[in-house]
Image (cartoon, rainbow, N blue to C red):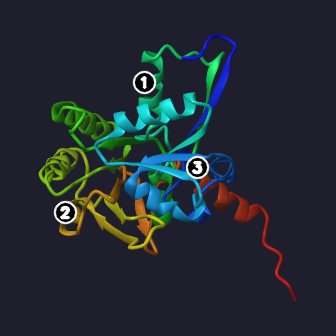
Amino acid sequence: MSEKGQKVGKMFIVGFGPGSEDHITSRAKKVIEESNVIVGYTTYIELVRDLIRGKKIIYTGMTEEVDRAKKAIDIAKKGNTVVVISSGDAGIYGMAGLIFQVLKEDGWRPSYGLEVEVVPGVTALSAVGSLLGAPLMHDFASISLSDLLTPWEVILKRVEAAAQADFVIALYNPKSGRRTWQIVETQKMIRKYREGSTPVGIVKSAYRDGQNIIITDLDHMLDFPIGMLTTIIIGNSSTFTYEELMITPRGYHNKYELSMKKMALEVPLAVPE
């Protein structure tokens, strides 16, 4: 790294949201505009192509995250302003953690040298939740079913703990061409603690081309296409569906429902003549 007190480049770790430009924050757009180098996974680069014209672009593949982080840091240390992009939020299953790990190994300190900022974005979880209605109003757990970096035994323990505790459960990376049985085992585990009629939302490519939204139940969730572009939300014991929406109350005692009934009795609505 640079000598203490010497300023070098800047690095922004940016979450650009689910994919549509409408859901990219103004801060994310601003730092992308100010940068001269963009580093990212090939698919993500294509999603923000219109925002990065005229900039130097470094592409890497899906399994090349470490190489991507090291390249971005090396380029920034040479005085460049570098943006590393992730879909959703860069700090949730994104690049932020890995970049900080590489920086730590390199002896980086926030007080001098490379300036680093994490720019938050709309998560896949938030995007999917908004398309389904309001399934995340109460406590929830987010679990990735990819066992490339986490042993399956650990993942299944987390699934069981979340199911037993009656969390709403969001599943990232539920299935791929080679990982087909994990979602089956997950359904079986959750079914031990939830009714088969528990609402389930399945969303593919939220706010991107090819978006598809399905609301079904726990017993029938595997009857529908599920892949790497899919995020699944499984309701808790109080989640219900209404008018093709999935809704989880913010508690177990119908606080708001009772309050609204009382309000309706005490404060009648004005009716125009």
Percent x, y for residue 91?
Answer: 49, 37
Q: Nearer the viewer, mark 1 or mark 2?
A: 1
Earlier in the chain: of badge 3 and badge 2, it is 2
Residue 29 vertical placement versus 189 (above, below):
below
Q: Which mark is residue 63?
A: none
Q: Quadrant of the N terminus?
A: top right
Q: Which mark is residue 255?
A: 3
Kind of residue sitting beneath label 3: Lys
Instruction: Give neighbour class at mark 3: few <14, some 14-19, many 20+ (Cα, 10 Å).
Output: few
Kind of residue sitting beneath label 2: Leu
Q: Residue at x 60, y 57 (%)?
A: 24
Residue 50 vertical placement versus 44 (above, below):
below
Q: Nearer the viewer, mark 1 or mark 3?
A: 1
Q: Which mark is residue 222?
A: 2
Q: Residue at x 42, y 23 (%)?
A: 101
At mark 3, the secondary structure is helix
Q: Residue at x 65, y 16 (%)?
A: 112
Kind of residue sitting beneath label 1: Val
Q: Quadrant of residue 230?
A: bottom left
Q: Which mark is residue 102?
A: 1
Earlier in the chain: of badge 1 and badge 3, it is 1
